[in-house]
Amino acid sequence: MQQILVKHKGMVSKFVDTNFDLFFDRYNNSLIRSESYVTKRQSIKLLGEVLLDRQFYDIMTRYVASGDNLKLVMWQLKDDRKMVQYEGFHVFKVCLTGVVGPEDDCRRLMASPDLRGKSEQVARGAQAVGHEQTATARLSTHFPGGSDRRRPVLGREGVPDQAD
């Protein structure tokens, strides 16, 4: 699946845009909710890569606009496995920095006692993992110039970076 999504971006982007609900229903239910560690981690990582790709920009805006998708990504922060949390955190940052993200859903979910402490713990743990490229750098690479509506971009520690 990764090879298809990465090598044939133009064709895949049109297909996913046309079949958005069907594609992500199956992707979320079969891969992200999988009990297999490898399947879950790789599918979350691939989701993050796809959402950050310039050719999938329209798909990213539709994905982050869905409260159900945001909720699914946030539930990955509660996973017992650290690397699933880490990959989920990168997708979560994409959702937070998305152009059309659901602000009310985000506030409501962040206020959830189950997720609040876990997201803070993952934010601190993401720094310890030691990956060089943050979502901030990846977003600026893929979406230079941003949009008319600017949102704070989360840094490695999970706090907004200083404005340029």
Image (cartoon, helix red, strand yellow):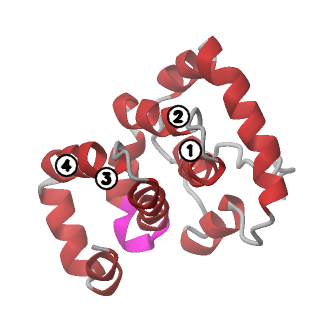
Residue 31's tag is 3
* Tag 1–tag 4 contact (CB < 8 Å): no
The answer to which quarter of the image holds residue 19 is bottom left
Q: Would you name the residue on which mark 4 appears? A: 26
x and y percentages locating residue 21 in the rendered image = 17, 45
Q: Which mark is residue 92?
A: 1
Picture layout, residue 64 above or below residue 129:
above
Q: Amino acid at mark 4?
A: Arg
> Is tag 2's residue or tag 1's residue first in the polypeptide sequence?
2
The stretch of residues the image draws in magenta is: 52-57
Earlier residue among tags 1 and 3: 3
Counting residues from the start of the chain, the first of labels 1 and 4 encountered is 4
The three-letter code of the residue at mark 3 reads Leu
Q: Disc 2 and disc 4: Cα gap in Å?
A: 18 Å
Residue placed at 15% from the left, 66% from the top? Answer: 15
Which structural element holds mark 4?
helix
Q: Residues within 10 Å of mark 1 (few under 14, many from 20)?
A: many
Does the segment drawn in magenta span residue 118?
no
